[in-house]
Image: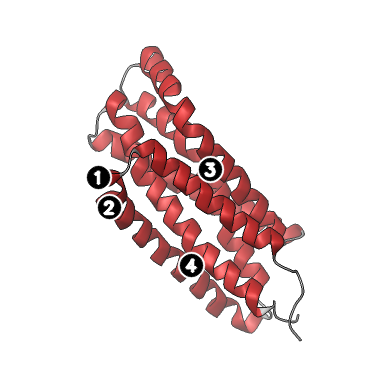
Amino acid sequence: MKPLSATLSFSIYACSFLVGGVLMGFEMLGSRYLFPYFGGGIGTWASLISTVLCALAIGYFAGSAIVARHPTQRSIALAILIAAAYLACVPATADPVMETILNSLGDGASATLLASTALLLVPLTLLGTFSPIAVSLLTRSADEAGRVAGLVYGVSTIGNVVGTLLTTFLLIPTVGSRAITYYFAVVLAVCAGALLLNPVKRSV
């Protein structure tokens, strides 16, 4: 298989970094949405972390299923775009959803798990499909599969770290949670656009 064009390869790695940053940034932001209703204790954080891990597991499995069929950059672009649309809806819908859960279930473990699921599961599952498909697109032969996988997951993990620190220590103290959510949605939409508008041609 011929390699992807240099521009498309760069776009995929850049998106891996940005998607990783948004993914963990939104997890940290999730605590701000849950705090007024369920507090910021260890139970809330356990619910958030568990939901993120479940979302990633589902996303990885779904991504591997897409790889087995017909992986393209449009597949990951579409997943990212839907995640962006979901995030754009969160600021307007989070409070009614949290209030409904609190009034129905109280503030126990089941309530915090359901609230975390409503907030995080769909967008982070969609973002979780990125890495398996990206590895498949960037891999030309079985011999380089390990190297490509290491690069993609390494770049994504660096994005995770940057997203966590940037959101926690800079964005949350200076920008409102809802505004940050919109910013994250825009970043994802830009990533999706970069992948959709990039030519599919492979270099010779």
Kindly check if marks 2 and 1 are in contact, taking CB atoms under 8 A apart as contact.
yes
How far is disc 2 from disc 1 in space, using C-alphas? 6 Å
How far apart in space, not on screen, are marks 3 and 1 (Cα)? Answer: 24 Å
User: Nearer the viewer's eye, disc 3 or disc 1?
Assistant: 1
Q: Which residue is mark 4?
A: 153
Label 1 vs label 4: CA separation? 29 Å
Instruction: Find the distance from the CA under tag 4 to the CA under tag 3.
Output: 19 Å
In this view, 93 is above or below 163: above
Is the residue marked by circle 1 packed among few (<14), some (14-19), or many (20+) residues within 10 Å?
few
Q: Along the polypeptide, which appears first: circle 4 or circle 2? A: 4
Tell me the mark number nearer the camera, choosing from 4 and 2: 2
Comes first in the chain, label 2 or label 3: 3
Residue at 31% x, 36% y is: 32
The amino acid type, in three-letter code, at marker 2 is Leu
Quadrant location of residue 41?
top left
Residue labelled with disc 1: 173
Relative to residue 124, is residue 194 depicted above or below? Answer: below
Residue at disc 2, secondary structure: helix
Residues 63 and 85: in front is: 85
**Reading the chain from its start, which is encountered first: label 1 or label 4?**
4
> Crowdedness of circle 2 by 10 Å Cα count: few (<14), some, many (20+)?
few
Q: Which residue is mark 2?
A: 170
Q: Residue at x 31, y 49 (%)?
A: 171
Q: Which mark is residue 123?
A: 3
**Horizontal side of residue 81 vs 180, given as left or right:** right
Q: Nearer the viewer, residue 66 or 195?
A: 195
